[in-house]
Image (cartoon, rainbow, N blue to C red):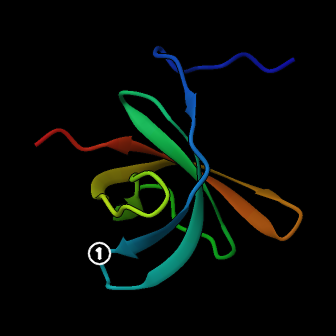
Amino acid sequence: MQQDKRELKRVRFERPARVITRGGEKHSVKSCDFSMNGAAFIAKAPVDVGEVLRLTLNIGVPGQSKIMKIYGQVIHRSKKDNQFLVGIRFNRK
């Protein structure tokens, strides 16, 4: 069994989301989970480790929009089937 390297508890949070890279590339993704330090999402296209990006998603309840924009750096990427699991660490600004 692989040991979880995160210091803080993960919260499962599966929602459609969008990623925008520094170069302006846009990718539709699905968020997986969050902690106070970072997040994970599933993408169809690879995002490079070290890339700084913006993750945008709706955190509102059904029928209500509440858009959240998160900036982070990709610290992990692994491939499973035809998708990529990407982990980001939130930027502190």
Query: Could one spot residue 51 in this view of the protein?
Result: no
Q: Which residue is at 57% across, 57% downward?
A: 15
Q: Position of residue 72 (x, y in %)?
A: 33, 51
Q: Nearer the viewer, residue 21 or 69?
A: 69
Horizontally, is 89 left or right of 77 in the view?
left
Q: In what element is the residue under mark 1?
A: loop
Q: Is residue 51 above or below residue 22?
A: above
Q: Position of residue 19 (x, y in %)?
A: 43, 70
Amino acid tagged 1:
Arg
Horizontally, is 37 left or right of 3 in the view?
left
Q: Is residue 5 above or below residue 51?
A: above
Q: How many marks?
A: 1
Q: Which residue is at 62% across, 70% downward?
A: 46
Q: Position of residue 34 (x, y in %)?
A: 48, 36
Query: Could one spot residue 17 in this view of the protein?
Result: yes
The quarter of the picture where residue 2 lies is: top right
Q: The C terminus is located in which quarter?
A: top left
Q: Nearer the viewer, residue 26 or 74?
A: 26
Q: Position of residue 54 (x, y in %)?
A: 32, 64
Crowding at dot 1, Cα within 10 Å, few <14 / some 14-19 / many 20+, comes out as: few
Residue closest to the far front:
63
Q: The N terminus is located in which quarter?
A: top right
Horizontally, is 57 left or right of 43 in the view?
left
Q: Which residue is at 89% across, 64% downward?
A: 81
Q: Read off the residue under disc 1.
A: 22
